[in-house]
Structures are given as C-alpha cells and as structure tokens.
Amino acid sequence: MKTQVGTLEEFVIGTQKSLEIGSDYVLVLRSISGFWAIEDRCSHDDNELLGGEITEHEGTTPSIKCVRHGARFNLETGKALCLPAVKAVKSYKAWLEDDLVWVEER
Ligand code: FES
C-alpha cells in the first residue's frame, strides 16, 4: 500500500525525514539522484539512520552511514555494505508523483 510522506517543496535535496508507517519507522530522503526510503533502524544495534551521511557516486546507488558505529547500507536494497552490520534493513520504493512524495514497501 502506498503512503504519501510529503511534498516536493518539503523535500529539497539533502532532506531526511523519519516517519512511522504501520509498525515501522521509515527514513525517507532525497539525494542528488532521487528519492529513497529504508527502515530507520540500523540492523547492527537498532540506532536510527536519520542524519547519516550519504555517499553518492554517478552510476551507483547511494548509501547511508549509521552515525553510531559506521555501518553503511545501500539505499535501494537495504543491504549492509560493511561491518559492523551484516543484515539488511527493510527497503521501500520512494518516488515523486504529481509533486507529492510516495513510499511503498518493496
Ligand atoms: S548501531 Fe549502527 S553501526 Fe552500530
């Protein structure tokens, strides 16, 4: 089920927003390459991912770094990219439609 999480106006590039959707906290963000959404809970030790540094290189999916111990997660798949996290976090589809930002579980 898709959920509206904001407007284009609110989501300037660099915006990160954490929202409760169903029983999950979801981090929705806009990077240079687009809109992304993943579970806002690090699989290493449950820290929020909100506020994490985004790494983005042309031609690759951006990643986010957990501020607590430095694990990185792929923003499209939720896959853990480095220790200390080994398990993926849940990933969501995020997109812009009619100037509104939408999220849906993959
Ligand atoms: S809680 Fe995120 S890396 Fe440890």
Image (tube, grey):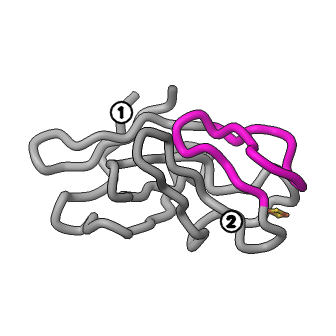
Which residue type does callout 1 highlight?
Lys
- Check if residue 76 falls in the magenta segment: yes
Query: What's the distance in space between the residues labelled 1 and 2, CA to CA?
Result: 23 Å
For the stretch drawn in magenta, the main secondary structure is loop
Q: Position of residue 68 (x, y in %)?
A: 79, 73
Residue positioned 12% across, 50% down in the render: 99
Residue positioned 85% across, 50% down in the render: 85
Q: SS for tag 2?
A: loop
- If you read the primary sequence from the N terminus, does the residue marked by circle 1 or circle 2 appear first? 1
Q: SS for tag 1?
A: loop
Q: Is mark 1 within 8 Å of ligand 1?
A: no
From the viewer's perspective, tell me whether residue 20 is left or right of residue 93: right
Write down the region rendered in magenta.
Answer: 71-90
Residue 3 versus residue 62 in the image, above or below = above
Which residue type does callout 2 highlight?
Glu
Q: Position of residue 58 (x, y in %)?
A: 41, 47
Q: Which residue is mark 2?
A: 48
Q: Which residue is mark 1?
A: 2
Q: Quadrant of residue 78?
A: top right
